[in-house]
Amino acid sequence: MSSEVRVPNLPESVADATVATWHKRLGDPVKREENLVDLETDKVILEVPAPADGILSEILAEVGDLVQSDGLLARIAADTAARTNETAVPSPSETAARASTASAPQERPDTTAPDTAEPQVAPAARRLIKELNLDARAIAGTGREGRIHKADVMAYLDQREAETPHQEPDAAQPSMAQSPSLTGEAGRPEQRVTMTRLRARIAERLVQAQQNAVMLTTFNEVDLAAVMALRSRYKEAFETTHGVRLGLMSFFVKAAIEALQRFPVLNASVDGDDIIYHGYYDIGIAVSSPRGLVVPILRNCDQLSMADIEQGIVGFGEKARDGTLSYEELTGGTFSITNGGVFGSLLSTPILNPPQSAILGMHKIQERPVVIKGEIKIAPMMYLALTYDHRIIDGREAVQFLGTIKDTLEDPARLLLRI
């Protein structure tokens, strides 16, 4: 008797998935709920667990194949051979060997043996560990309950390389010059790599934004001295109370909500000839992941405290690294915020995230001389960029919206007083 491994039900917005990685080979034993295969969609990576114990007897979808909801991926045969061996009559030689073992003095078990339990490993880290033939138990995980992220694997590799600086490169890891997929003239190599589903989806949505909206960007700058002073004064108490660091993003989310409430058209979207004004504030926070940029959604941000916002963002970051963001966390949204400053960007023009009509771009904080009340002072300044859909948002509204964010951040007491 065999069990079928099928593609889990995909949301209506996802037509199909691509088989990314098989974690077992034909003939390998598998255990119930053990991850067998990763499926990549244009939004997330799905782990498909084994439905039963047994032997992987048949693989019906190879790496790179497109599969749809409830499609058959593999079959697992019942491990009858193992059960037969357990009940088989031992041979005379086996009987003698067992008798010899029984008569020999028994050693006490070593109670100091190392723990061989398999650690929890994120999908991206698991693939890297498998490719490099590493022992996951040797890698220290920094995630919750010791979960190993891709960054932990890279840190382990860096440490190992530092400890053995003269070690020759691993022959199992081909260099660029050895890669069989390279083309081009000698000394001028080229390599063709198929886009991941997420990267292809990002490209599709960027083209869609360019073609279906009239994008315009307006700029301003904000003095973050007051916000930074507030963070410095309360960061320890905030972290002690709420168990999360007080970051900049919660200030920007709260300031954005204040501005969106004053200028609701920036929280709206276009549907054909209609404008849909949303009476809620679901803010998309751009997060970098090993697979590319994703924008998970913080729901009902007007009802969240700053601690709730910071905890939500931390959770999104961990899930993005693990590749465990759900479809629900990546769909919807009425407004987005992206922070290129974490990568050192001083100024940029963000692109809309359809069907949203506006996106706020944060950038690097840089100390610059500015004139404040007639005096030249050094202040921590950040350029802000607001890209908006000019079909429904006028320049006046966009400029005033960005001015509201600037005023709120330069005097954070406005958030409490709602002025």
Image: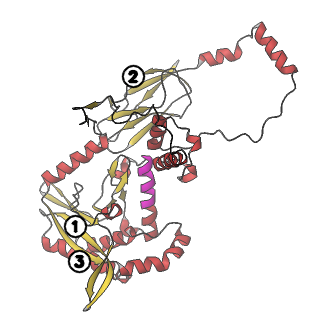
Name the residue tied to disc 2.
60
Quadrant of the rendered image containing residue 410? bottom left
Task: Indicate the amino acid at tag 2.
Answer: Leu
Task: Indicate the amino acid at tag 3.
Answer: Gly
Task: Kindly state the secondary structure of the residue where label 3 is placed.
Answer: helix
For this rendering, which residue is in front, 304 or 171?
171
The first of marks 3 and 2 along the sequence is: 2
Q: What's the mark number on residue 403? A: 3
The residue depicted at 32 percent of the width and 28 percent of the height is 180
For marks 1 and 2, give the one nearer the viewer.
1
Answer few, some or many: residues within 10 Å of disc 2's Cα (few below 14, many 20 plus, some between 14 and 19).
few
Quadrant of the rendered image containing residue 183? top left
Report the magenta residues as a range.
Answer: 313-323
Task: Indicate the amino acid at tag 1.
Answer: Leu
Q: CA distance from mark 1 to mark 2?
A: 48 Å
Q: Is residue 305 visible?
A: no
Name the residue tied to disc 1.
386
Mark 3–mark 1 contact, CB under 8 Å?
A: no
Where in the figure is residue 152, as x and y percent of width and height?
50, 49
Image-based side of 319 in relation to 185, left or right: right
